[in-house]
Amino acid sequence: IKKYIVQPRTIILATIPANVDIATVDVLQRAEEIDQAGARTIGVITKPDLVDRGAESEVLAVLTGQRKRLLHGYYMVKNRSQYQLNENVSLAEARDMEMNFFEQSFYKDHLPRLGINALSKALTKVLVQTIRNSLPAMMQEIETKLNECRKELKQIGPSAPKDLKGMRRELRTIVRNFILHLGQIASTASPKHVPSDACVWNITLESRRRFLEKMKGSHPGFDGEKDTFIGNYEGKELKGLKLIAPRSIVDLHSDETVIEGKEGRELEVEIVGYERYIRDEVKELMREKRGREMSVFLKPEVFVSLVESYTEDWKGNAIEFQKRVSKAFLAAAHHAIDESCPENNTLRKSLKQFMESWVNKRDKQAARNLREILRKEQHPQTENPAFVAEYQRIREAKVKESFEAEIPALDELKTREDLLAHFMKAYHKTHDIEGHSVQEMLNMLKAYWMIADPRYVDNISMEVDSCYTQPDVVKSLEDEIFDDYGENEEKLKFVFTEDEFEVHKRESLLEKKNLLKKACATLNKSLGVYGHDYDSDGSEADMLDGWSRC
């Protein structure tokens, strides 16, 4: 019973047999717990004909509210007995017999609260007030359901066209909306209502920054910062050592401060060998490639070979960048399709398959073009004046570094010959025939990297953009999709074939929508009726008629 009486629009008829002690009846207590103000509770006393003689005064005390008060009071009714039911006594006859009973009863002085008619009028007044109080919430509830119904209908979409002309027209509309959504997502930094994994422009910018950072870290370490050495420390051989102050020239059997292991422990060790020493790599390749020319000449083949070898690591960074943009573009396409096509629509599923195939083709095209860009970078050339300027700056910095290491403070130099001797010592340290050639090659590589590294990032970024996100690429999709679907009658009919469940669901929602609209109209029309007070002249029937129509 509780699940019914807790509802705020339910009128509680607290029925109490007259021949039972009110103290033993819990219905009033249960009603009071739910309806504390008593606004929708009416007490109904039944079976007055079964009251023992002499106990009538106790029943009267209940009827008049002396025992347990209720806001709307108590009413007494006498229903048909089993004998009367067996004799088929009509309701009208039963009402007459009921009033004859009360007019001759102990309770005759309280006729306004006696009989079914009195209870009906009281119940109607309470019902009117309940309706009046519930009306705003009812209107809001119906409007909410109506909006939900409209939303579901929008998701399902209108019924599919039946003829080819209508199908092509609907296809063009859907595809244009899809292209519009996709174009906004692909070219806008913060598109609204778009999942984070489908914000192509944001992901592209972030991926490019990450690509650039990885490229900066991919250089081979022209100043020795990526060299690793083998050292002798207290009679133990240690590997994987890195100089605490990296430099390109490191003498074997010299004492150096190094960093050991991941913990970064600093040690003073004797360098006895190396695992990776870029200066030695360059020197060995120059010896290998040397022909009949004199050792002072630098061979272009060596430079090209070194660039080709060191730029091979660029490939993985470019592929990672391309894949991130490709994945974001496909997610954006799926989101744009969801925004443009009705839910559970065959065309929606088919368009997603089309885009997956389209992106797959673009991935293959991008992979080919990325390989070609890398191939071109592995055949180095540049007319950029910044290369020469950077090369000269690096050379001067190396010479200055060498001189600062060999020339003491001025107050320690006694003669001009002392200065000249230190100068020549520094010069020869960096300008021995083979060592000078190696250093010049490293200088050129480092200078070229300053040009080629960002150029490669730019070229890859522009190529990826031209494969996926350029506005003209997105716009060309419209014609590609329409050509694929619009010219194929069988395919067109297939994608516009509706599932029977969807058809039934749309019809049910349309019926529900119409009923809810009628309910809203009826309630609005009846507002004037609800705004009046009702008495016993029968005008309650007008109100109840409006209520029943809702």
Image: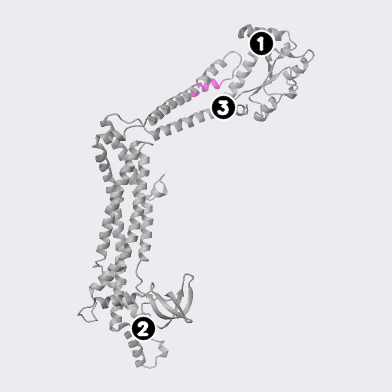
Q: Residue furthest left?
A: 292
- How far is disc 3 from disc 2 in space, using C-alphas? 95 Å
Q: Answer with left or right where residue 410 lies relative to residue 531.
A: left
Image height of 230 relative to 526, above or below: below
370 relative to 163, above or below: below
Q: Which residue is mark 1?
A: 82
Q: Quadrant of residue 53?
A: top right
Helix, strand or loop for disc 2? helix
Q: Secondary structure at mark 1?
A: helix
Q: Amino acid at mark 1?
A: Gln
Of marks 1 and 3, the one in the foreground:
1
In the rendered structure, are the residues bearing label 3 and label 2 in contact, judged by CB atoms less than 8 Å apart?
no
**Quarter of the rendering containing residue 541:** top right
Q: Amino acid at mark 2?
A: Phe
Q: Nearer the viewer, mark 2 or mark 1?
A: 1
Q: Nearer the viewer, residue 140 or 29?
A: 29
Q: Amino acid at mark 3?
A: Ser
In percent of the image, x 30 and y 49: which residue is there?
A: 360
Q: How many marks?
A: 3
Alpha-carbon span between mark 1 and mark 3:
39 Å
Q: Residue at x 25, y 37 (%)?
A: 486
Label 3 residue SS: helix
Whole-percent x, y for residue 51 in the image: 75, 14
| Disc marking residue 134 | 3
What residue is at 29 percent from the left and 63 percent from the top?
455
Q: Is residue 386 visible?
A: no
Q: Is residue 202 visible in this depiction of the protein?
A: yes
Q: Which residues are magenta?
A: 523-532
Examine the structure image and report whether residue 88 is included in the region drawn in magenta: no
Q: Which residue is mark 2?
A: 403
